[in-house]
Image (cartoon, rainbow, N blue to C red):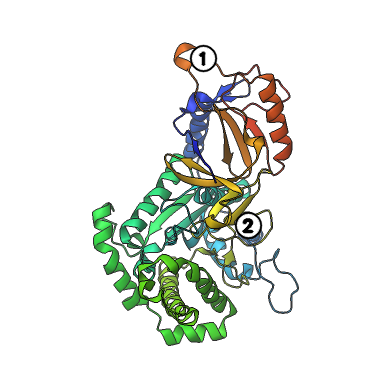
Amino acid sequence: MSVIQVNSSLSSDDAFLADTFDEKQLKSFLFEEVRELSLTPSPSPTPAHDLDSLASDILDVVQSYGQHLPSQGCEDSSHSWIGKPFFMAQVKAQVEKCEAVHLILPAFPWKSVNRIEKVIGKLPDLGEEIALFRLNQLCEDIKAIYPPGGKVFIATDGVVFDDVVGIPDEDTWEYGEGLKAIVQDHGLDNIQLLRVMDILGYTKDKPLDKAVYLALAQKCREEILSSYGRTEEEVRQMMKEDPDTLLTYCGFIRFLESDLKYSPVTADSRSMSGHKYRKTVKKVAIQMMIRAESFTKLLQAHCSGYVRLSIHPSSGSVKLSIPLIIQSSGDFPRSPWHSSLALAIDGSYSMVHAKDVCDTHDLITKDGRGYYFREKSSLWDLGPDITCEPRYPNTLVVRPTSVDRCHGGETKLSADQMNAFAALKRAHTAGPVLLAGFSTGTDESFRIL
């Protein structure tokens, strides 16, 4: 495996947009458009007889992002959502007030403690970026049929589990700050990140900085367990009665078996037999379930009118299971915090364990950190000063690593590079390949961004 560095220091005006705008001008234009829309009076309330139809259409948009397991008596429910009627009342209530449809997703806790075999660092990478873009696009799609749109509230729940899996609260804080940076830097305005402290009301009168966060972490864990806590007996009974709860528990066991290999929680268990280690994993898994169900109870109390999303596979009876990354296989993906994103030459994604692609992929870095894995191929090699940047959903942007504008410099592709670009474009079938930052004199048969 080789390591390739991505240059992320380009200014926004390094790209050309067709023949009319450069990127700076377009951003200014869009800002004015958004400003005008924000000054437009809110639409009048929807007539009562239209509420059912509109709410149903909105939930159909939400459903289009879901993927579920077959329910009893149904051969394939992957393209239907049996829980849709459950959320009609919540959506109708928000539509009646002309409010954005609120969706709640407990997710994005931290990067796996196994940073040797599974993930490529402790901070968010391209996997989280693609996932956040997808959630933001869900709300944009709602906006296409309902102007107030949607709002995804991500309840970042890492601090709830830190002490159970052996992740320092400091790492969880830094991961959350990385998520905030992605949301802000990319203008993902349909996403709001909520930490546990926000939900419990500790941040109403004061900003949440690292010192306050660390001081509140254990207090929040204790409050959740004392006020909303489930007992082990309750959780085990829930697993007997509800297949989705049992499915989540089995999922916890699967990822903990690899996660805990490098956790201080199981430091004394590494010399044990496989049977004893698995017993330790199951003990941690049941503690994870207790925390998870307690956190769910907290969300039910504070976010009762929200559409519930989940990153865990389920039947969809009381939530929408949403894949955060669309894989070429069509399988429900691993989460970005328990795996690494691998980009194939055709532009498709797979969520993999880092150790499994070391021989077949190059590690691409950005800002000195691991960013994603890219399938090894000579087709990526367009020149030493040219970089390929994956963008949501499956777009590839080809741009120069730097442009010397101070001296009137322009970057042009040579004939050989144009041929190489054409070959890459033919192979990259999952999405478009665009040129950015090159001279507009490039052959018109290629799309210039």
Which amino acid type corresponds to the residue marked 2 in the rendered image? Tyr
Q: Earlier in the sequence, mark 2 or mark 1?
A: 2
* Label 1 sits on residue: 409
In the foreground, 154 or 101: 154
Q: Quadrant of the C terminus?
A: top right
What residue is at 54 percent from the left and 77 percent from the top?
Answer: 245
x, y percent for residue 403: 50, 21
Residue 391 quadrant:
top right
Front residue of 42 and 107: 107
In the image, residue 237 sits, relative to residue 371, either above or below, namely below
Q: Answer whether residue 43 is visible to the viewer in this image.
A: no
* Crowd band around label 1 with a 10 angstrom C-alpha radius: few (<14), some (14–19), many (20+): few
SS for dot 2: loop
The disc at residue 35 is: none
- Where does the image place residue 161, in percent across and percent down from the top left? 38, 68
Instruction: For mark 1, give the secondary structure.
Output: loop
Q: Which residue is mark 2?
A: 65
